[in-house]
Amino acid sequence: MRCFTVLGPSQTGKSTLVAKLASLEGTPKKSSSPYNLNLLEFQFIGETWCALDTPGANEALAVAQDALLASDACVLCVSPSPDDAVLAAPYLRAIEASGTPCILFVNRMDEPRGRLRDVIAALQAYSNHPLVLRQVPIREGDKIVGSCDLISERAWRYREGQPSALIELPLNAIEREHEARTEMLEQLSEFDDWLLEELIEDREPASDALFTLASRIVKENRIIPVMFGAASHANGAMRLMKALRHEAPPAAALQARLAAGAALTGEKLSAVSFHAFHRANVGKTVLIRSLVEGLKQGAALGGAGLGPIQENGNGRAAGQTGSVFAAVKSDHIPVPSLLTPGQAIAPPDWATPPTPMLERILVPSSERDEAKLSATLAKLTETDRGLKVMQEEGTGAMLICAQGPVHLRELRKMLSEVFRVEVSERAPNPVYRETISKPSNVHYRHRKQTGGAGQFADVHLSVRPNDRGQGFAFKETVKGGTVPRNYIPAVEAGAREAMEKGPLGFQVIDIDVTLTDGQYHSVDSSDFAFRAAAKMGVRQALSEASAVLMQPVIRVEIHIPSIFSGGMVTLVSSLKGQVLGFDRDENAKGWDIFRALVPGGALEELARSLRSATQGIGYYSKAFDHFEELYGKEADAIINAHGSGLRSA
């Protein structure tokens, strides 16, 4: 079996294209999984094919990346409008990073929205591979009625509901065809000395030799050929499928490509897991593509025996090289992963999904659901690498990080329909801190008599601001044994405990506490008493030392196509952030990395504004940088909304 992925932005007609390709010779078999990954198996000229139809939402880019792990080749489906070329940038980036041979298909060409050469020029801005036009349109007015293949120089006229008809190339298209063919030959000659010599000697290369050359260059992933059509009318589908048949490499090439970057320990790469989902009463189902013969239930794969194999719309025997199948009761197989009989190997770095930008607290609707939620989310993170789960600081509530609103909606739907866990959502509590702006000296005596052994501890403490980022420091300058050495660790512990919540209601940072003097009682003093005295003494000192609110400042790296970089200065400034600069992204043509510092409380607005400003394409990674003081009405509003302490008069 041969396998290819169809990917691209939303509203480009991917699913329609896949359906037409799969229906060229009969009715395909179809299977789908959550988040809209569809698998279609079909026959074409005596060969069995599996098409992976991926979702087009930017939030589901990880699904497309994982599908590329199992694909011999891919088809990038794009809009016929040059203005929409930027929407394909994330997919071109993923394709090039994966090393997957690709054919670019400009769909919906029945809608006159721009010239084909302008579409290719706009897309070339995001591709290191040359985009080589392989067809030119035949027009009647503004309507495209057919195409001419630039290698065979044969022209075809589209016919609704019927195969295209072979025709003579119209006179008004001859000049454009010659111009485009010359350009194509020049591009191909950069990868073959024979063709270069033919062109230098002004000899016309034979079509058969050109087809062979083009096939080899595409299999070697050195160019991206460009074709076009209108999938809704099946226009161009046959030519695209024939190109896949001749130019997509076999499964052995995929095996070699994946093995080249994997840490194999003498074992042969047997398969790749590329998708998984959960079904009620079934559990985890893993989609696997076999790269060797003989995989069947019980076979060693990923370090354990392969579970039962189910038909996944294709009904093929899993033991055939290249076959795609679903396995249940194979929870030991991580997804995605490269699989040998004895181990599961992490996928290449290029398959890492973008950093999730939407953070939410999931609140179970009942105590029963609360007990299930943690275990359920752990299962989901095993099958969805775009999802991150952690605990909220302070409350311990379940904090999830999703790719965006659509991803979050799909997650909640799965929790409800598959796991029967109902949840609501809320924004996480912001992380603020407080410190002091002036020193304070305090004398605190802890004394309690309850009838038996009493409690007594007397401490003199000096509490001062520490340098930013230095955290908590403790020292003692006690002389003459006024506080026995064995009680000093208890004083430090009490001081640390007092920092858990300051007068504004937040954790206290960056203070220096010094124990300067004290008293003890030979009977009533204890570790507990000195700890209590230090805790209450530091609290008193903090309330007298002019508490200051501290907000987190986050360093962000915003990944965006270059055409959006100019708007980032205004966006960051509107969030009271600081622009640090930007550089070209060395790993992706046409992309920039924009660096900035932004307040932690502005991250959600940054994610929302970034999606809006970049048509959903841009994303950021983040890391904590430092805390800084916050004053005025903004600080008062935060303290009133989130603080739980008492401000001193």
Image: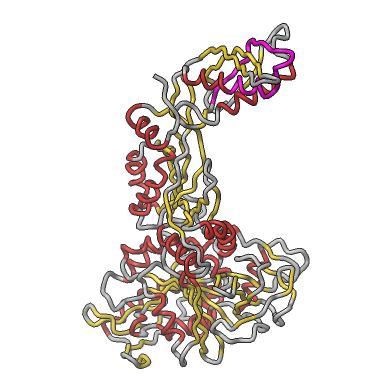
The foreground one among 143 and 134 is: 143
Which residue is painted at 44% across and 33% down in the image? 644
Horizontal side of residue 474 vs 624, given as left or right: right
The foreground one among 8 and 459 is: 459
Asked if one can make out residue 15 in the rendered structure from this viewpoint, the answer is: yes
Q: Residue furthest front?
A: 451
Could you tell me residue 389's position as x and y percent?
54, 53
Question: Is 562 placed above or below 340 here?
Answer: above
Span highlighted in magenta in the image: 510-535
Horizontal side of residue 259 vs 461, given as left or right: right
Could you tell me residue 28's position as x and y percent?
48, 87
Horizontal side of residue 461 vs 16, given as left or right: right
Question: Is 163 placed above or below 599 here?
Answer: below
Screen quadrant of the C terminus? top left
Q: Quadrant of residue 617?
A: bottom left
Could you tell me residue 575's position as x and y percent?
35, 40
Which residue is painted at 49% across and 77% down in the image? 32
Could you tell me residue 106's position as x and y percent?
37, 73
Which residue is painted at 60% across and 17% down in the image? 446
Find out whether residue 514 is within the magenta segment: yes
Which residue is painted at 23% across and 77% down in the image? 142
Q: Quadrant of residue 304?
A: bottom right
Q: Residue furthest left?
A: 141
Find out whether residue 182 is within the magenta segment: no
Screen quadrant of the N terminus? bottom right
